[in-house]
Image: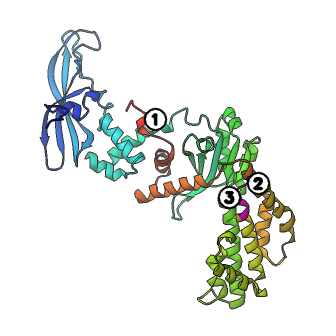
Amino acid sequence: MSNATFVAPDLTTFCRLDELGLVAVGQRLERVRAVLRCRVVAPDQWCRRCGCEGRVRGTVIRRLAHEPLGWRPTTLEVVVRRYKCSECGHVWRQDTSTAAAPRAKLTKRGLRWALEGIVVQHLSVARVAEALAVAWNTANDAVLAEGKRLLIDDPDRFDGVNVIGVDEHVWRHTSKGDKYVTVIIDLTPVRDGTGPSRLLDMVEGRSQAVFKDWLADRPQTWREGVEIVAMDGFTGFKSAAAEELPDAVTVMDPFHVVRLAGDALEQTRRKVQQHIHARRGRKGDPLYSCRRTLLTGAGLLTGKQHARITGLFADERYVEVEVAWHLYQNVITAYREPDRGLGKFFLNHQIQTQYPTIPTGCTEARRLAATLTKRAGDVLAYFDRPGTSNGLTEATNGRLEHLRGSALGFRNLKHYIARGLLECGGFRPQLHPQL
């Protein structure tokens, strides 16, 4: 081998035991794991009470789970010397805090590997515990404790937040207890182009009081620094932000506005279908055949689809659907306009002039128009603040859904919040070299 990097393999360096203050003195390969016998490098023979030199009284073995090397879990058997002071009789052991915290069962390298596996590679706790050859509770408790120390209890975690997003999230799908939590996201890095969004906190419940209390718990200087709050159409979040963040601009993001318009169109289509046929749509029914075409932007319609829409609206029985369709298309057209100023002008013109003229019988369309008119300031604020969208909050909800699925559900909300903050809170183990 002409380009060998070393001649004599150094097990201590290869397994990165030197970072832990250990040196390898032996190895044993078992069927399900690799065992490394180690000793502590630094001497510790001086009494911690009187300072006199102690004498060796014996040794004990401390077993620690190390980062896995290959497909086998790696276990360290650390030989720890016991000393007894010849003067005061005090007995102590060699200090192994460089390798692992007191009473810990994972080395610091093993803990770092577990954090990277769960946070960066999105592994389950069961998979991490199996790779370390420890119990599930051991791996879970160690990761949560270290993550809490480094991220959740970090006093600087809320610094530099100027743009936030708020939304609800379903954390459990059972009837037992409150199934909703309020999710608060930091959108400042996205607005400034410095990085991805991150999860700030999750609070049990979904109401104006929940979000208001969370804001009230933040320092006054922090609340004064919040410039923009992105949210959906829930008026409770709007009221809480208006009370606690009076100087902040509330923005209703395009995702929820388009969804409101699409829901109004779908509800109108189903109502008219039931009114005409007294049943749900079937193959061959005009409204049922056009259900996907109706939700397609007018600028993306093919000639065949355009002809189908024109033929549908030629029938006076579908007037309500036509009104809701035009509202939906107006919203899409405004958001797809490259010139934000022109898009804002067009949507504002529709709200001010067209919405009040909607016929009385178009219940769903009038309800949508009333919502957009009431929240016109929040809807139009998006056009003046590019990069501010609650869509990233929905993306975070998706990551939380994946987390819950990989864990096969959570029963403890505090545990779920802690895992969620590690998963989406912007924590990166590589930024913490002290691990």
| Residue beneath disc 1 | 150
Instruction: Tell me, yes or no, whether the highlighted magenta stretch contains residue 338.
Output: yes
Q: Amino acid at mark 3?
A: Pro
Task: Quote the CA–CA distance across marks 3 and 2.
Answer: 10 Å
Locate residue 433, reporting x and y percent: 39, 31
Q: Residues within 10 Å of mark 3 (few under 14, many from 20)?
A: many
Q: Residue at x 14, y 24 (%)?
A: 58
Q: Secondary structure at mark 1?
A: helix
Q: Secondary structure at mark 2?
A: helix
Instruction: Work out whether 11 lies above or below 272.
Output: above
- Nearer the N terminus, badge 3 or badge 2? 3
Quadrant housing residue 85:
top left
| Residue beneath disc 2 | 380
| Residue beneath disc 3 | 254
Q: Residues within 10 Å of mark 2 (few under 14, many from 20)?
A: many
Q: Nearer the viewer, mark 1 or mark 3?
A: 3
Task: Quote the CA–CA distance across marks 1 and 3.
Answer: 35 Å
Q: Amino acid at mark 1?
A: Leu
Q: Secondary structure at mark 3?
A: helix
Q: Amino acid at mark 2?
A: Leu
In the picture, which quadrant includes the C terminus? top left
Task: Quote the CA–CA distance across marks 1 and 2.
Answer: 40 Å
Tag shown at residue 57? none
Q: Which residues are magenta?
A: 333-341
Q: Residue at x 71, y 77 (%)?
A: 268
- Nearer the N terminus, badge 1 or badge 3? 1
Q: Could you tell whether 156 is left or right of 142 in the image?
A: right
Instruction: Tell me, yes or no, whether the highlighted magenta stretch contains residue 57.
Output: no
